[in-house]
Image: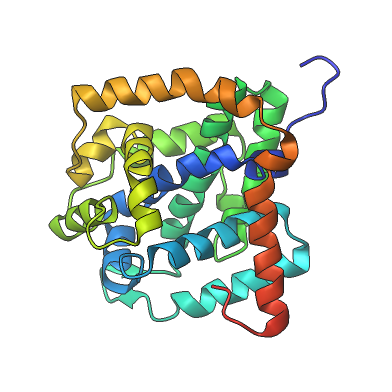
């Protein structure tokens, strides 16, 4: 990139295009059976999808763009929500290994979408974004030393973990319902077909297999066509438009917190 400054986690997270990776991040998370079971048995995502998306994005935006004090505050809120999410011998939301995987999916999907839109990052930027992404994990119960030290170690961890994923009927049902428009609000019904395509297309084939999700020839063609057209259109948008969702979510977080309303 020559004299261009390094890309940071904030640069990646503030771009609205990374929202296209939200669905694939969730699918990757629940594909790890203990995470998936915990979500199935405790999450209210299916009952209030828009609000659950808001809380998830609030965590991402505050960790990437918020102040250290705001990051600590949101971490405390997440810990309170995670308190009841445990089942003896099956899952525990405070398990650092499970939290590491959830954080890894966020660290993986944001840069993946960013590079599909803007092109490959230079190595220094990619390493910097990876290092800064550790906050997704270390803000909770993951020791700093457990975060992969560089991209090579992260890649090894990623590939190794994908091989451990195993199917579960309850998680498969949850994944199908998550991507179904049945009974959803109008706005969700309008956006879900695209999000479903992005979610299913954005995960490796083995993850679709673990979750029992379809991927047809028509899906492949539509996914490829989208990524042929979207980056050019998106890059032409003014930066204030591209960063509007991040600014709105942060403003909403700060307003809710100031008024004592529920954030997470």
- The C terminus appears in which quarter of the rendering? bottom right
Q: Position of residue 82 (x, y in %)?
A: 45, 74
For the residue pair 198 and 189, the one nearer the viewer reads as 189
Figure quadrant of the N terminus = top right
Direction from residue 180 to residue 56 in the image, left or right: right
The residue under the point 47% across, 77% down is 81
Residue 101's spot in the image, x, y percent?
44, 51
As drawn, 247 above or below 95: above
Q: Please, is residue 4 above or below residue 94 in the view?
A: above
Residue at the image position 59 percent from the left and 61 percent from the top: 58
Q: Is residue 121 left or right of residue 38?
A: right
Q: Position of residue 249 (x, y in %)?
A: 63, 59
Residue 176 visible in the displayed image: yes
Q: Of 12 and 6, which appears nearest the observer?
A: 12
Please identify the residue farthest to the left as the structure is shown. 169
User: What residue is at 51 percent from the left and 47 percent from the top?
Assistant: 106
> Among all residues in the image, which is located at the extreme top?
2
In the rendered image, the vertical position of residue 15 relative to residue 54, given as above or below: above
């Amino acid at each position: 990139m020559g004299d261009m400054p390094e890309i940071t986690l904030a640069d990646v997270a503030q771009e609205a295009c990374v929202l296209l990776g939200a669905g694939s991040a969730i699918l990757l998370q629940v594909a790890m059976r203990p995470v998936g079971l915990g979500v199935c048995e405790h999450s209210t995502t299916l009952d209030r999808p828009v609000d659950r998306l808001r809380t998830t994005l609030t965590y991402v935006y505050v960790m990437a763009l918020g102040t250290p004090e705001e990051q600590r505050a949101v971490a405390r809120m997440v810990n309170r929500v995670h308190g009841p999410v445990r089942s003896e011998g099956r899952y525990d939301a405070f398990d650092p290994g499970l939290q590491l995987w959830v954080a890894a999916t966020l660290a993986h999907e944001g840069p993946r979408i960013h590079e599909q839109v803007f092109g490959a990052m230079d190595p220094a930027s990619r390493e910097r974004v990876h290092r800064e992404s550790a906050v997704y994990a270390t803000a909770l119960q993951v020791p700093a030393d457990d975060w992969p030290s560089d991209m090579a170690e992260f890649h090894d961890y990623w590939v190794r973990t994908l091989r451990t994923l195993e199917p579960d009927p309850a998680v498969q049902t949850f994944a199908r319902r998550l991507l179904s428009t049945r009974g959803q609000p109008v706005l969700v019904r309008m956006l879900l077909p695209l999000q479903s395509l992005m979610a299913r297309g954005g995960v490796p084939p083995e993850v679709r297999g673990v979750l029992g999700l379809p991927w047809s020839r028509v899906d492949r063609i539509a996914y490829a066509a989208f990524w042929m057209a979207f980056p050019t259109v998106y890059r032409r948008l003014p930066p204030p438009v591209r960063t509007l969702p991040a600014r709105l979510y942060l403003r909403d977080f700060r307003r809710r917190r100031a008024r004592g309303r529920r954030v997470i």
